[in-house]
Image: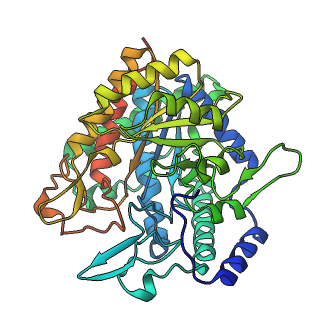
Amino acid sequence: MDAQAIAYDDAAALDAACARLRELPPLVTSWEISRLKGLLAEAQVGKRFLLQGGDCAETLADCRSSVIADKLKILLQMSLVMVHEGKRPVVRVGRFAGQYAKPRSKPVESREGVALPSYFGDMVNRADFTGDQRRPDPGNLLAAYAHAAMTLNFVRSLSAGGFADVHHPEQWELSFFRRANAPDSLRQEYERTTRQLADALHFMEALGEMTVEELTRVDFYTSHEGLSLLYESAQTRAVPRREGFWDLTTHFPWIGERTRRLDGAHVEYFRGIENPVGIKLGPGVTADQILRLVDALNPRNEAGKIALVTRMGSGRVGDVLPGLVEVVKRAGRTVLWVCDPMHGNTQVAPAGQKTRDFDDILREVETTFDVHEACGTILGGVHFELTGEDVTECIGGAAGVTVDDLDRNYASACDPRLNYRQALEMGFRIAKRLATHGRR
């Protein structure tokens, strides 16, 4: 059973769209996926750290060079301070080039007596509350593919062109700090970090250290929730000289909290692909459910295959997570533990907007670090909804956003994201913990 199946009313058009998707070139390659799986295996044992972030839901309209470049910049800047403080490489995975579908709690939305299909992301329909825009359109599957391809092309071009050269972090447009009105202390700390990292790189190169190449050029990998099984399966295929089947829409798909039923269609699909797979876990999950999911999706207990992405909420993570971690540890399952501190901390402001409090988000991250340190396990990554733009969607942090500011620039299509200043501040806070985590 597909828990988030879309009711398309034109079966012929749907068949034609899926047939075309099967003919189109893959968006990513199996060897890129294999490399990422190896990097995630190293993150499982504390040799690397995963930074995963991007939009809650991409829109086709935001497939613009400035928007894409800004998302890369904030991921680069966050990872830079983590590399510097944590003294380990960072795996950068963007929630982009495919995050066009969103799960919904109800298939129908009602406003003032009018009922229309819920907005399931631009891969399915549009956010405007009209009958035409909310009608699921099979053509959106092809539009999502095209925009994902354009996004990936630009990301790869930027990386190949030196945009992500760690030798020159000063080129990551520090003027962006001024445009975002970042606090002087944050700007100064970042500039100090870039100078120190540049000096360290030059020193390592002077000594002839070959491992410096791992840090000087930055790879980006893509991820999205594998919600539309029509989209994912149409780009799933066998490849020459490799075993198994590969989902070539993205490097790192994940299963959501609403679609991780053991007898559901999503788990059945994901157990058949070679990609690393994330599993979102809310506070209601049981240890038995986790073990059964891990065994179904990774029966060989392969390193780098499974990421358990916990999203408990700051008020519950300290009570719920320790027991789950201990059970998985005792069972000997090889997993990457990742903290998603966004989804468990959503609240509704007095004016009705969904928002999240920076302090709640940070508290969940810090408590998750505490839990893993107490259990003798490793928190190997974090997963954020963020943007490189100066939006006002989450409150708190050095950005100083209050509930009265939410209407000023609330641009998200679905869930509230950390803005540029909040994301960079979060990066510094996490980097401080990385300096000691997993090294005791």
Quarter of the N terminus within the rendering: bottom right
| Residue closest to the far top | 440
Work out whether residue 53 or residue 314 is closer to the camera in this orientation and state it: 314
Q: In this view, does 225 lie to the left or right of 232?
A: left
Classify residue 304 by image quadrant. Answer: top right
Q: In this view, does 439 lie to the left or right of 216?
A: left
The image shows residue 15, relative to residue 212, as above or below, that is: below
- Name the residue: 31% across, 44% down: 344
| Residue closest to the far right | 241
Q: Can residue 251 be seen in this view?
A: yes
- Name the residue: 33% across, 66% down: 412
> Which of the colour schemes (rainbow, by chain, secondary structure, one colour) is used?
rainbow
Q: Is residue 407 left or right of residue 322?
A: left
Residue 182 locus on image (x, y percent)? 23, 52
The image shows residue 307, relative to residue 258, as above or below, that is: above
Q: In this view, does 319 lie to the left or right of 218?
A: left
Classify residue 370 by image quadrant. Answer: top left
The image shows residue 359, relative to residue 240, as above or below, that is: above
Residue 91 locus on image (x, y percent)? 54, 39
Residue 192 locus on image (x, y percent)? 33, 36
Quarter of the C terminus within the rendering: top left
- Name the residue: 42% across, 36% down: 285
Residue 242 locus on image (x, y percent)? 84, 44
Classify residue 386 by image quadrant. Answer: bottom left
